[in-house]
Amino acid sequence: MPVVLEKTTDIKVVKRDGKKVDFDGSKIALAIKKGFDSITLYNEDTDTYEYKYNEKDIQKVYQAVIKIIEKDYPEKIKIEEIQDLIEQELSKKGYEDVYVSFSEYRDRRNQSRQLFFDEKKTHKFLKTLENLALKTSNEEDTKRENANVDGSTSMGTMLHFGSTISKEFAKAYMMKPKFAEAHDNGYIHIHDMDFLPMGTTTCSQINLEKLFKNGFSTGHGHLRKPKGITSYGALAAIAIQSNQNDQHGGQSIPAFDYYMAPGVLETFKKEYKQTIYELLDFSDFISFVNMDRISKEVDKLDSIDFDVSTFEPIYKESTQVLKIFEDAYEKALLKTDRLTYQAMEAFVHNLNTMHSRAGAQVPFSSINFGTDTSKEGRMVIENYLLAVDAGLGKGETPIFPISIFKVKEGVNYNPEDPNYDLFKLACKVSAKRLFPNFSFIDAPHNLPYYKPDDYNTEIAYMGCRTRVIGDVTDGGKEIVTGRGNLSFTSINLPRIAIKHGIALKERDKADMKGFYEELESLIELVKDQLLERFEIQCSKHVYNFPFLLGQGIWNDAERLKPNDRIRRILKHGTLSIGFIGLAECLKALIGEHHGESEKAQKLGLEIIGFIRKKCDEYSKEYNLNFTCLATPAEGLSGRFVNIDKAIYGKLKGITDRAYYTNSFHVPVYYHTTISHKIDVEAPYHALTNAGHISYIELDGDTADNVEAFERVVRLMKEKGIGYGAINHPVDRDPVCGYVGVIKDACPRCGRKEFESVSVEKIQECC
């Protein structure tokens, strides 16, 4: 049996507070064991983690430490000295990986203690909590970090409390100190750090067809397979709400029109049978037909687009009964269309009012649609767009779901295409309501994945811009459905450029060698941090994510058992390295951004190409989907610039505004043409395979000039944009609250600018 030095009266241990206690060798043995147990190896065959070292290794270090203590510390020893001895023996005996793990854990514990026992850090931490509790979201920036969370509500404040504490726990216990330090110092930003301890992933594209096949459970009862468009729309919203509770990012539906189309068919069948029965009941031909046979034949229909002559064997050449079948078809079609509109209206209203995460957050939802050419799919697309056009209950422009119309030649782009009318309608609605945005399947970086008649290969975006399609782990999984981003971390490009460029006037020419060396170092750091977080995610079990995995939202999750770990399916997601402030980066390096000169544009493409190249290299090296992201976070833009401003002061065109420009965007303050902005930004879409978007800002009421609006969308498509949006002014009446385009008078209350309106009138229209 191994010898353990138990409690003795001869040696005292001096604790950190100076108190002396009896020596207990078992505690040293346990500390060493924890260090060794932290080193595990993944066994792909058994899908388990196995300890790299055994009891003999633990005892080798333990016995060496005990001998030194007995020899050199006969009376007393400090806790820090015991830890130093453990590190010394680990290193001396060649256990470098255990040494690093033990040392980093020790550092994290010290950071944690400082948080609560260092007077300055404790004061700062408690001050943050105090602000969360006592200040409104207008006064406290932290409460506005997530646009979907109302930080002024009780539940919103509760979430922010948890988020603040969780971030500190993640930094102290769950990541290497160098990652936390790089984040705190503003070199990188680890997104959604508060969810790191939970091992959640960012987002996913929900395959409703798969989910609806046999119904699903939300954890509080099983929901049957939907049997009509009303229940299809309702369950789609519930699926988004439920999955939001298992992830820290957004939820997206990649082929909304295809998924809803079967619901239209089921509704039509029901309405058609009912209408036939009603018309026959008021005729002299009720005994002429077999009612059961009608029901069975209608149930066989695979489309609402059919010739009534299909039922000739039933009406037996009777022109009167044929007329009943024809009239019933038209009436059922109208009823189905009306019910589809109501279902789409309810879907939009639900996603702007329902909550997740303890009732404090509206789910960040997106839907992609536009390419289903079936009569059912077209009915879904048209009615969804009409519902968005109508707005919410008081005419407000709906924020969710973020609608994305998929543009494809041969489907909806040209006048001869079957869904061209719906593309025109999408432009009309977006010109009024800001949505839908537009994605382009024919973009050079999207088209190679496209397979005709397989909507799983049609590019789909999360509303914020996330894109998932390629898969180095399995070519057969190069689809959008059932996949998403695992996590992403962004690099502060302006910081590196300020240090190595001409902005500080320390040199006449940028030190590009130094810039790329530091950029590569930070990319390497982010890669390691993403891998560390990936291991935390992979260590979780199916039961940790009861909807995402338990209901098979993520691809292949149905193959796993509740207690299984999830590496084998998570590997199909993406690990993304993002960036902020390319425009300010270029200004700091050479004095002009990519919208101002070809020289800057060439350098900008070179810089982002460098990041993409490293991502591709990591993908091959680790057999994981490392991707380059054009980071969307506006809050992050402000965080970085505030830190850099404190270090370097106000630098013209760099740190003299309240934000860094998002991703590769040409700055909004730079006056340029629509065509030029699209020309400049388009090449970056091909480089940022984790996601991207280009915005065009228009003045005036675009609803009055839909043709011009459409020309902008077409220009995006022709230039190779992957995902684009057009922003334009949306007004709000300060009296009745109407949100939308207001011309001479408010469409709701009739008030003109600077006019007052009676309370009775407001109550009447609201």
Image: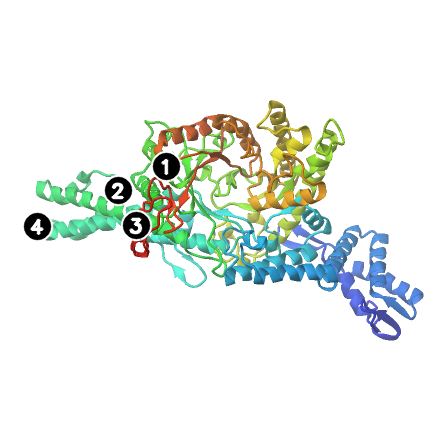
Label 1 sits on residue = 426
Label 2 sits on residue = 304
Determine crowd level at label 2: few under 14, some 14-19, many 20+ residues with C-alpha closer than 10 A: many
Give the CA distance from mark 2 to mark 1: 23 Å
Give the CA distance from mark 3 to mark 4: 31 Å
- Residue 199 visible? The answer is no
**Going 57% across and 63% down the picture, which residue do you hit?**
133
Disc 2 and disc 1 in contact, CB within 8 angstroms: no
Q: Earlier in the sequence, mark 1 or mark 3?
A: 3
Label 3 sits on residue = 342
Closer to us: 555 or 366: 366
Kind of residue sitting beneath label 4:
Ser
Farthest-out residue, top: 598
79 relative to 720 in the view: left or right? right
Farthest-out residue, bottom: 9
Q: What element carries label 4?
A: loop
Q: Which of marks 2 and 1 is nearer the N terminus?
A: 2
Give the CA distance from mark 4 to mark 2: 25 Å
Disc 1 and disc 4 in contact, CB within 8 angstroms: no
Label 4 sits on residue = 283
Q: Earlier in the sequence, mark 4 or mark 2?
A: 4
Q: Earlier in the sequence, mark 1 or mark 4?
A: 4
619 relative to 28 in the view: left or right? left
Kind of residue sitting beneath label 2:
Ile
Kind of residue sitting beneath label 3:
Gln
Closer to us: 148 or 727: 727
Determine crowd level at label 1: few under 14, some 14-19, many 20+ residues with C-alpha closer than 10 A: many
38 relative to 733 in the view: left or right? right
**Going 22% across and 45% down the picture, which residue do you hit?**
334
